[in-house]
Image: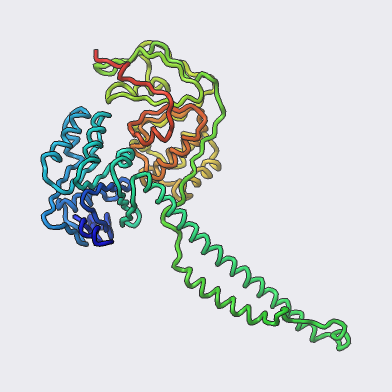
Amino acid sequence: MNNKNQQSVIFSCSHISKKFELIEVLNDISFTISKNEKVGLVGPNGSGKSTLLKIIANLMEKDGGVVSYSKQVKIKYLSQIHLEEEKLSGGEIAKKILLPIILSDADLYILDEPTNNLDTDGLFMLENFISKSSKAFLIISHDRAFLDKIVTKIIEIDVVTKSSSIYAGNYSDFIKERKLKIERQWKEYDDKVEKTEKIKTNVNLRSAWLKRVELEKNSAKNLPIHEREKKPLDFRNPDGKSAKRLKVMKDRLERYESNSKNVTKPKYNLPLKICFKNERGSTSVFDLKMVEKKIGRRKIGPINLHIQYGDRIHIIGKNGTGKTTLIKMVVGELKVDSGIVKRGENVVVGYIPQEKWLDRPNNKVISEFLDVTKISETNARKILNRFRITTEDVNKHISLISPGEYSRLIIAELIATNPNCIILDEPSNHLDLEVIEELENGLREYKGTLIVVSHDRYFVEKLKLNKVIDLDNNSKKI
């Protein structure tokens, strides 16, 4: 770090660690924040992000490490909990976030999920204020579009090692660099394994050759003298150094294998390759005619909608306008109060409702997978293995697998059903980073019909959805 950057640093933490009873939450967390810097803190749910913020804000004791502030630096911490206590509109929540920032003379603001429950206007207000602010910010957010627009550095908490990694740039820069880093680690590992195997093969071939030569030499000793003269034997390579070269190679292999004992597989797997295949159904996927439904004191409809094969639809609307209700009527989980919903012939729907991510069935992994997909157990195990759900994992009760494994299970179920119409209700709220990134890649190449409810701007943009159903215009109080 040059002198100029050293002078602008207003906060640093070095080797921070924290345990709750015997569970290690953080280990070796180190980074700095400079004046005016906007920093994003990312990591899977349960990786200790909120715990770290509380330690930095002096609201929780650390077990080890050092937290340092430059002289007279003031910190303002806005927790996620405080922002969710009241029933406010998105704009009111944005003002609630911004007011203490505007009124405070702090140098560093720590924000935990500030975009939760914000509408479009609220998001714009918050993004505009933070990006123009001369103050420093450390932010936890699942809103990847928000991080893309605001931050210039990403701190990632590694859920495996509980340590930190630092990436320059915004969220998209972080994703690219992280992927390249994982690919480099695997290439180095594969190169090391390949080199060791090559040396082993050469040693084994030369050992086998020397053994054959020794057998021929011993056999020749028993031949009559005139037979030996007829068939002179050369028990050496052209360079005459086979035995010596073999010893050199064996020594080299021993040294290489000794060095390789400490070489382990990278802790992060290569990205999942999510690819959807389907047989096309009819051109007409769903027809809705004068559909209406009461939801408490609100009514949606009448809705007239024609969905064709290949449509990529984004259902939008404020909370309570009936987005999930509309989806449930389309798939037949809810009856309409009036009107007609007609499904086209050979339309195979892959549907993941919001509650699917939260309500784990009382079942074993393999049983649940077979119940949902209706495929053979052999094929089921192959698909699950592809999603890194091992032979041991498939027989576990679903309550015992990790959130990441459960995410992969749900996406594996979706792929195995070969849907030609995929319907997703807020999928990115509950998926691990790796899974959501690869799901986006798979859905971008998907040729079937796609219907999505999502507030995740980053997700929506990557999917290139081309039709919008706005329920704000089809919903009213009664």
Please report the residue visible at 15 percent of the width from the left and 57 percent of the height from the top. 70
Viewer-nearest residue: 48 or 90: 90
Residue 138 shown left or right of residue 192 in the figure: left
**Residue at the limit of the structure toward the front, as seen here:** 4
**Residue at the limit of the structure toward the bottom, as seen here:** 225
Image quadrant of residue 194? bottom right
Image quadrant of residue 160? bottom left
Decide: is 380 above or below 61.
Answer: above
Viewer-nearest residue: 307 or 211: 307
Q: Position of residue 212 (x, y in %)?
A: 72, 76
- Asked whether residue 371 is in view, the answer is no
Q: Quadrant of the N terminus?
A: bottom left
Q: Position of residue 251 (x, y in %)?
A: 55, 78
Decide: is 211 above or below 25.
Answer: below
Q: How is the image coloured?
A: rainbow
Q: Position of residue 291 (x, y in %)?
A: 38, 13
Decide: is 5 above or below 443.
Answer: below
Residue 348 shown left or right of residue 7 in the figure: right
Viewer-nearest residue: 341 or 143: 143
Decide: is 75 above or below 129.
Answer: below
- Asked whether residue 113 is in view, the answer is yes
Q: Quadrant of the C terminus?
A: top left
Q: Position of residue 356 (x, y in %)?
A: 37, 34
Badge count: 0
